[in-house]
Image (cartoon, rainbow, N blue to C red):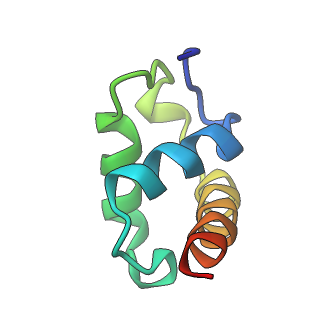
């Protein structure tokens, strides 16, 4: 898999959906989301470069993936 950064919101969303398939992305606090992203195996982004806007993009992309998986 390719290296993930804060701008890889689609790929991060896929990884989070695989790792946490039963979690509603909208129920996740940004502090937890940030930690979960940083803990992804392929994540190489700078934790200090995280912004609320980047977390929102990741969360919305994850929501789309989650909804598709839920059918």
Task: Find residue 11 and report its horizontal and vertical position in percent.
Answer: 63, 38
Task: Find residue 71 and report its horizontal and vertical position in percent.
Answer: 63, 82
State the count of labels.
Answer: 0
Query: Which residue shows up at 67% across the image and 34% down it?
Result: 8
- On the rendered structure, is 56 left or right of 12? right
In the rendered view, would you say 36 is above or below 69?
A: above
In the rendered view, would you say 56 is above or below 34?
A: below
* Residue toward you, 24 or 52: 24
In the rendered view, would you say 24 is above or below 44?
A: below
The picture quadrant where one finds residue 31 is bottom left
The picture quadrant where one finds residue 4 is top right
* Residue toward you, 39 or 21: 21
Query: Which residue shows up at 56% across the image and 48% down it?
Result: 14
Task: Find residue 1 and report its horizontal and vertical position in percent.
Answer: 53, 17
In the rendered view, would you say 46 is above or below 69?
A: above
- On the rendered structure, is 10 left or right of 70? right
Query: Which residue shows up at 69% across the image and 45% down it?
Result: 10
Query: Which residue shows up at 48% across the image and 74% down it?
Result: 25
């Amino acid at each position: 898999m390719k290296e993930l950064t804060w701008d890889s919101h689609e790929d991060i969303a896929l990884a989070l959906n695989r790792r946490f398939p039963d979690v509603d992305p909208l129920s996740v606090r940004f502090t937890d989301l940030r930690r979960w992203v940083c803990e992804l195996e392929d994540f190489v982004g700078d934790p200090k470069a995280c912004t609320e806007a980047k977390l929102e993009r990741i969360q919305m992309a994850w929501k789309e993936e989650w909804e598709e998986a839920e059918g």
